[in-house]
Image: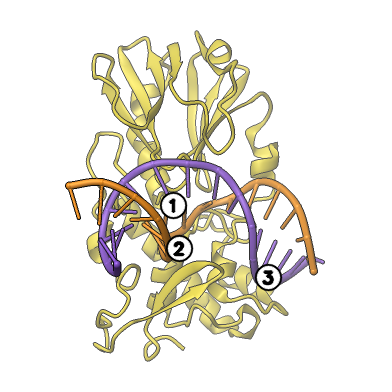
Chain colours: A yellow, B purple, C orange
Amino acid sequence: MPELPEVETTRRGIESSLLHRKIAHVLVRMPKLRWPVPPELAHLVTGKTIEQVMRRAKYLVLKLDGGSVLIHLGMSGSLRLVQSNLTAGKHDHVDFCFDSGIVLRYNDPRRFGSILWLENDPLKHPLLKDLGPEPLCDGFDGDYLYQLSRGRKVAIKMLLMNNQVVAGIGNIYASEALFTAGIRPDRAAGRISRARYLTLAACIKEVLNRAIAMGGTTLRNFLKPDGQPGYFKQTLLVYGRGEQPCTKCRMPLKQIRLGQRSSVFCSRCQR
DNA sequence: ACGAAGCCCTGCAAGC
DNA sequence: TGCTTGCAGGGCTTCG
C-alpha cells in the first residue's frame, strides 16, 4: 500500500517526463473511485501544461495553469508511464495522454484511490489543509511529538498513523519505526518519555529515507512508474512477519489488532 | 476535542 | 474444481 516513500518514489519517477508537457487528452475508463472522477476533468485539463509535480502526505499534486489534479493512490493504486500504443489492462482506470506521446496511466484494483480537480490552492483544500507536518522536514522532531502526545491515551502507533499528527505514515512504516525505536505499538502515547520520542522521530526519518532510496515497498500491487517494483520489502523487520522470529532476539513476533489494523511487534525488544 | 467504529472495494487464501 | 468466507486496509465520515 502506497505510503509516503511509495508516493515520493512515484513523484520522482514521473516528474521529469511530465514537467512542461501538455495534456493532449484524458481517458476515464472507470470513474468510480473513492470519490467519482469529475465528469468535466478531461475538459478542464486538456491543453494545459504541467507546471509542477508535488507531493503532500500521500497525495500527488499535478499543478497546471489555473488548477491542480489531486491524485491519491489509496491502498492498491499505482501510476505508470507508458507509450500510447500500450493496450490498457485490468484496473487501468484513467489515462493522461501527453503531447510527447507518453501516457500517465492510473491503475487501482481496489479503487480506494482518488483523482480530483482543484481550482484553488491545493494546500487550502479540505483534504489537505489539516494535515500534520511532513515527517522528513525540520518541523517534525521528537519534541513536536512529545508535546502533542501529552495527555493522550491513544496507542502510539495510531498516533503515528494519524495524518493530522504527521503526514504520510501508514501501517508499514509506523510498525518499522516503532520496532527500530524499541517502543511497543500499543503503548499509550501520553506515557512515552521525551527522550524516547527523540529516538522515535529519528527512527521515522531514517526508515522513510531508506525506503525512498530503495524505491519503496512492493507488497502486491505497487509498481514504480517504470513498471519495476520497490525493494524495501526485503528489509522489513516486523511488518507482515507475525509469528516469525525477531531479527534481534529470535523470539517469535507478536501480532495484535490496533484500531482495526494488524500490528506486529516483539514483546521483548519493544517496551 | 478525542477516540472508536463504519464504509468504500477487489484479490487472495483457506475451508468445505 | 468451484463455491463461500474472511481478511487485508487508508482515510474520510459518523457516532458516542
Helix, strand or loop at disc 1?
loop
Helix, strand or loop at disc 3?
helix
Q: Residue at x 36, y 26 (%)?
A: A105
Q: Single out the mark in the foreground, 2 or 3.
A: 2
Residue at mark 3: A148
Q: Measured from the top left, where is residue A119 in percent x and y? A: 67, 23
User: How many neighbours does mark 3 have within 10 angstroms: few (below 14), some (14-19), or many (20 or more)?
Assistant: some
Q: Nearer the viewer, residue A60 or A112?
A: A112
Q: Which mark is residue A140?
A: none
Labels 1, 3: one chain:
yes
Specify the amino acid type for callout 2: Asn
Q: Is residue B14 left or right of residue A73?
A: left
Q: Are marks 1 and 2 in contact (CB under 8 Å)?
A: yes
| Distance between mark 2 and mark 3 Cα atoms | 20 Å
Q: Is residue C3 left or right of residue A32?
A: left
Residue at mark 1: A3
| Distance between mark 1 and mark 2 Cα atoms | 9 Å
Above or below, A115 relative to A208: above
Above or below, A192 relative to A258: below
Q: Chain of mark 2?
A: A
Residue at mark 2: A171
Q: Residue at x 52, y 82 (%)?
A: A196
Q: Nearer the viewer, residue A147 or A168?
A: A168
